[in-house]
Structures are given as structure tokens and as C-alpha cells.
């Protein structure tokens, strides 16, 4: 076998896209002693050690990671990099939180040097938490997009991002008109979309900060660049939902506003989607749109409980988002632990197999990237995370009682965080390690 890198360790992934939690459990794959072959940034093969050993080149050897658990890299389906510095802002729910804390911080991204500092810090947070792909909000300023894409390109990450578009109900220092928003977005798409592994997401912030002209401009961009992504917010908070119904009385429900302008569809990702009517779930399904479930944010802002069972029932694509800075962590492990608790409050039992599916292949499916990332299938890009399940005294004690991989994964999502991420690999290269990368 003509390989560049071979890695021995324990591997867990889900073999295929699934339409129920039971199907996920059936398609989960665990290799306690496996061997992964990588060539030119892609996965060549993953097989049991006994089968793979014969393909090893004695001169090249292999990287021995026995005792560690390798998972496909995590997919963060919704996050705001400019809010990194204001994570954990006290006391408010969504609309007041935006005006009190968020807009002032986002205004700083007119400054290129500041944008570069935060972009580099943010990308380090992603990889040190095992996140290899993210769908990211920047700010209104093209500089914020330049800074983020420049750093993601340096690491050759599969990252999708876009400039926030908003032209009303925002402070003057953070507003633009629809024509400028269109022009700047268009230029950024032409400059960045499909450069390396990057993708561009057209990013109207949400309906309340969009005029009809702005959404018409978004619609035009969607037609001009049909393979870009689209990200926005939907039905996060009851006051927000009521405001949308005041602002857009001609549309019966929140999602109808976006749907009217052709913003639903493949590669459209709606963050939160908590307070939805049956007909909105149906529309998300019918249009092939996706949603992002952001448990730490929804609890932190007191927004409500995402209805995972309704999402399955309507067969709507879903990924997990950290939603920093309303979300309280970059760690997908901690985020999954909170997702479990959101399930508990609705008598829904989120199994570890399902949780890790959403964080990997399911998230990739939501972003329409499941042909490229999300599992160890041959031909996929070699983005993965190396986990040490035993980094704290409590974890070591608890793990002694674990009966199988599922219990181990569940303990990881309950007690785990960035300390458990010992290495992160992007495109076949180690980009982060608890030991310094040489
Ligand atoms: N809705 C509109 N903008 C935002 C934002 O920045 N964060 C969250 N959580 N919701 C939003
Ligand atoms: Zn958000």
C-alpha cells in the first residue's frame, strides 16, 4: 500500500448517514486495535491491526497511539468567531444581550490587526478542542472575513464562513445598506469560495436586522452563486419570534420570511430553530435545509429547549453548534454533555452513539459535506481527533467501571473537555498536540 502515514489506535465512527437514532447504533463501528493509512491528505483505509499489519512498510513504520481513541474531527455547525472575547456575558436574554454586549465587541473588527489577533486565537481554540470544520459568522467588516480565511487556509482547514449582512435595527457604527452588503459579499465570494478547502456562507444575521431589500440582495447572491452556503438565525427566543411577526406581518411564520426570499434549501443552515410550528419543520424538510442545535447557548441565554425528537420526526438535517459567545464553550465534548441534559428535560435519551454522530457525520451531512468528511471511510479527507479518555483523576476512576465503548463515550461527553484532546489532524497533518508540534 502506497501510504504516507499509518496510525495504530482505537477508532470509532459511524459508517453511514442515518435517519434514526436506532440506525446510528446499528452503523456504529469500533475497532479496538485498528490501523489507519493516509495518503495525500486522504484516508486510504482503516482496518483491524491483524489485517493491516501486512501492508506496513518496515522502513516507514507507524505512529503508535494505542491507549487513545481516534474519532473523526468534530464539526461545529454554528459559531461566531468575533464573540470569542465576550463569552460569558452576564444577565441578558437574546435581544438585550445583542445590544448590550455583542454589537460593541463586533464593532472592533473594523481594525485589521484586532481581527487577525482574534481569528488566530479562534482557530487555535477550534483545533485544540478537536474541531476540524466549522460554519462561522464573521462581522459586518470584510476585514473580519479576510483574517479568518487567511488563518484557516494556512492550516488547510475545511471551514465555511461569511460576512454578516445587516441593514436595520443595529447601531449606526454597525450598519450598511443593502447595496454595499451585496457588493462586499459578492467580492468576498469571488475571492474566497473554494479556495483551498474553504467555502463561503452568505450570512444575513437574522430577519430583524434585515430589510426586504437586504433579503432580496441575499436572494440574488444565492442565484448567482448556487453552491455557496447560507447561514442565519431562526426562532431562538420568544421575543425575537414576536418581533419578526411585527416586522413581517405579511408572513405567517418566522421561516416563511426566509422561504419567501428563497433562502431555504440545500446548504442553508438555520441556527437554533427552537420555537417552530409543525409547518416550519415541514418546510425545512421539504427544502432540504438544515438546523444547528446549540445547547450551551440555548441554556445560557434561556432561549428554550431544542426539540430533537421533532427534528428526527421531520427528518431535518441537524448539526451541533457551540454558538460561542452565547455558547459557553468551544468544546464539542462539553456541548454534547449539555445536549444530553436538554434531552433529559424532554424525556429524550440522547445516547452516546447518537451524540457523537451529530458531532461528526451528522454535522457533515447537515453542511452537505458528508462525501468529504465525518468518518474514516476511504477517500475522505483525513481530519480526525486523538482523544485521551483518562486525563483527570475522576476520569481515571470512572473509566475503570466502563463496560464498553458506549459507556466510555458517554463518560467522555459528561466529564470531558479540551484536556482530553491530545492531538488534532487536518488534511492528514497533525496541527495540534498537547506535546509541542515539531
Ligand atoms: N441572533 C442574531 N444574532 C445573534 C447572535 O450573534 N447570537 C445568537 N445566539 N443569536 C443571534
Ligand atoms: Zn448565532
Image: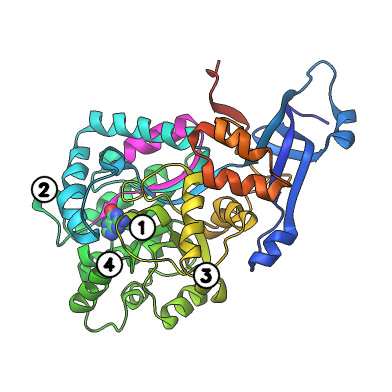
Mark 4: is the Cβ under 8 angstroms from ligand 1? Answer: no
**Secondary element at tag 4:** helix
Colour mapping: rainbow
Kindly give the residue lying farthest to the left in the view shown.
172
Which tag is nearer the camera, tag 2 or tag 1?
1
Mark carried by residue 299: 1
Which tag is nearer the camera, tag 3 or tag 2?
3
- Which stretch did the figure color magenta? 145-165
Q: Are marks 3 and 2 in contact (CB under 8 Å)?
A: no
Mark carried by residue 173: 2
Which tag is nearer the camera, tag 3 or tag 4?
3
Q: CA distance from mark 2 to mark 1?
A: 30 Å
Q: Nearer the viewer, residue 89 or 205?
A: 89
Taking the magenta stretch, the answer to whether it contains residue 151 is yes
Return the disc, 3 or 2, that comes first in the chain's sequence: 2
Which tag is nearer the camera, tag 1 or tag 3?
3
Q: CA distance from mark 2 to mark 4?
A: 21 Å
Query: In which quadrant of the rendered image does the N terminus lie?
Result: top right
Taking the magenta stretch, the answer to whether it contains residue 438 is no
**Secondary element at tag 2:** helix
Place of residue 356 in the rendered image (x, y in percent of width and height, measured from the top left): 60, 51
Q: Residue at x 24, y 31 (%)?
A: 114
The residue where tag 3 is placed is: 347
**Secondary element at tag 1:** helix
Q: Are marks 4 and 1 in contact (CB under 8 Å)?
A: no
The residue where tag 4 is placed is: 215
Q: Residue at x 85, y 18 (%)?
A: 58
Amino acid at each position: 500500500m502506497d501510504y504516507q502515514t499509518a496510525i495504530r489506535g482505537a477508532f470509532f465512527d459511524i459508517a453511514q448517514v442515518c435517519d434514526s437514532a436506532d440506525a446510528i447504533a446499528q452503523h456504529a463501528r469500533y475497532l479496538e486495535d485498528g490501523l489507519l493509512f493516509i495518503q495525500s491528505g486522504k484516508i486510504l483505509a482503516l482496518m483491524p491491526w491483524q489485517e493491516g499489519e501486512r501492508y506496513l512498510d518496515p522502513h516507514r513504520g507507524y505512529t503508535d497511539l494505542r491507549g487513545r481513541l481516534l474519532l473523526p474531527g468534530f464539526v461545529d455547525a454554528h459559531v461566531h468567531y468575533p464573540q470569542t472575547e465576550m463569552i460569558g456575558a452576564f444577565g441578558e436574554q437574546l435581544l438585550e444581550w445583542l445590544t448590550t454586549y455583542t454589537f460593541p465587541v463586533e464593532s472592533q473588527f473594523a481594525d485589521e490587526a484586532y481581527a487577525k489577533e482574534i481569528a488566530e486565537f479562534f482557530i487555535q481554540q477550534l483545533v485544540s478542542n478537536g474541531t476540524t470544520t466549522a460554519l462561522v459568522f464573521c462581522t459586518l467588516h470584510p476585514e473580519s472575513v479576510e483574517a479568518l480565511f487567511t488563518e484557516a487556509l494556512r492550516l488547510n482547514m475545511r471551514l465555511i464562513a461569511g460576512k454578516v449582512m445587516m441593514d436595520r435595527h443595529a447601531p449606526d457604527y454597525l450598519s450598511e445598506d443593502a447595496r454595499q452588503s451585496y457588493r462586499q459579499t459578492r467580492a468576498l465570494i469571488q475571492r474566497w469560495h473554494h479556495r483551498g478547502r474553504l467555502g463561503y456562507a452568505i450570512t444575513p444575521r437574522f430577519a430583524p436586522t434585515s430589510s426586504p431589500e437586504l433579503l432580496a440582495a441575499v436572494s440574488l447572491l444565492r442565484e448567482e452563486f448556487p453552491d455557496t452556503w447560507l447561514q442565519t438565525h431562526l426562532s431562538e427566543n420568544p421575543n425575537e419570534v414576536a418581533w419578526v411577526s411585527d416586522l413581517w406581518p405579511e408572513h405567517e411564520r418566522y421561516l416563511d420570511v426566509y422561504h419567501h426570499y428563497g433562502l431555504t434549501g440545500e446548504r442553508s443552515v438555520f441556527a437554533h430553530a427552537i420555537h417552530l410550528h409543525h409547518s416550519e419543520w415541514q418546510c425545512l424538510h421539504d427544502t432540504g435545509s438544515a438546523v444547528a442545535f446549540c445547547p450551551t447557548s440555548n441554556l445560557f441565554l434561556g432561549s428554550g429547549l431544542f426539540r430533537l425528537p421533532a427534528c428526527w420526526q421531520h427528518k431535518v438535517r441537524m448539526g451541533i453548534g457551540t454558538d460561542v459567545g452565547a455558547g459557553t464553550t468551544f468544546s464539542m465534548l462539553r456541548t454534547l454533555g449539555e445536549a444530553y441534559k436538554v434531552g433529559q428535560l424532554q424525556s429524550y435519551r440522547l445516547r452516546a452513539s447518537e451524540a457523537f454522530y451529530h458531532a461528526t457525520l451528522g454535522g457533515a451531512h447537515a453542511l452537505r459535506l458528508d462525501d468529504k468528511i465525518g468518518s474514516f471511510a476511504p477517500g475522505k479527507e483525513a481530519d480526525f481527533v486523538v482523544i485521551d479518555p483518562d486525563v483527570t483523576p475522576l476520569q481515571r476512576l470512572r473509566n475503570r467501571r466502563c463496560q464498553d465503548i458506549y459507556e466510555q463515550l458517554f463518560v467522555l461527553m459528561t466529564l470531558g473537555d479540551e484536556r482530553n484532546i491530545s492531538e488534532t489532524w487536518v488534511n492528514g497533518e497533525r496541527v495540534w498536540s498537547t506535546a509541542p508540534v515539531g
